[in-house]
Image (spheres, rainbow, N blue to C red):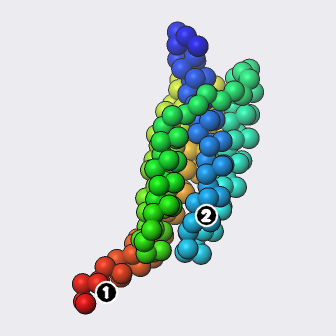
Amino acid sequence: MALDDLRDLLIEELRDVLSAEKQLVKALPKMAKAATSPKLKKGIEKHLQQTEAQVQRLEKVFESLGEKARAKTCKAMEGLIAEGSEVIKENGEQAVKDAAIIAASQKVEHYEIATYGTLVTWAKLLGETKAEKLLAQTLAEEKATDEQLSLLAGTEINLEANEGDAEEDEE
């Protein structure tokens, strides 16, 4: 696709993020299975449901723009998922692995926040009100998920991961 104007760029980035979300739908169950914290596992499962809804919402965005919902492989998400998969395969203390799963999850969230923030801005500039509203809804969900991950990390997971270090220091 030639990028001749902002609308072309919007469509191209929508195809990229559609791929990213579809990749996440496949990756999140593996992350949930690897998590040992019940709260983390539940949070990842909730995010999976949200991500499935976000794929459907993206299809509505394409429809509102009169375009076919076609994904274009998102290399960035492939890399982020590959990095998260490496963490899952590592040996080590479960609390530390849970902390690593949160870190990998937040990298994904920050990528999505940056992407959806840009898409909302472009849709607004182009006067694509329906697309803007749908994309803004997803952006808000991504921000909320990131906040939940930060809260869980700060109040529980990272503290548990650090307890193992403290016990080793005492020996």
Q: Kindly indicate the quadrant of the structure image that contains residue 39.
A: bottom right
Q: 56 or 65: nearer the eye?
A: 56
Residue 128: image x %, image y %?
Answer: 63, 25
* Residue lying at 58% horizontally and 23% vertically, measured from the top left: 12
Residue 167, label in figure = 1
Q: Amino acid at mark 2?
A: Ala
For label 2, the residue is 32
Say above or below: 136 vs 14.
below
State the count of labels. Answer: 2
Of residues 132 and 1, the one drawn nearer to the viewer in this rendering = 1
Pointer 1 and pointer 2: residues touching (CB < 8 Å)?
Answer: no
Please state, as top left, top right, bottom left or bottom right, where the N terminus lies in the image: top right
**Crowding near the residue tagged with mark 2, few <14, some 14–19, many ≥20 C-alpha atoms within 10 Å:** many
Q: Nearer the viewer, residue 110 or 22?
A: 22
Relative placement, left or right, of 166 versus 26 is left
Q: For this rendering, which residue is in front, 154 or 35?
A: 35
- Label 1 Cα neighbours within 10 Å, binned few <14 / some 14-19 / many ≥20: few
Amino acid found under the numbered disc labelled 1? Glu
Instruction: Name the image quarter holding residue 18.
Output: top right
Report whether residue 150 is seen. Answer: no
Q: Residue at x 41, y 79 (%)?
A: 160
Quarter of the image for residue 9 reads: top right
Q: Residue at x 69, y 41 (%)?
A: 55
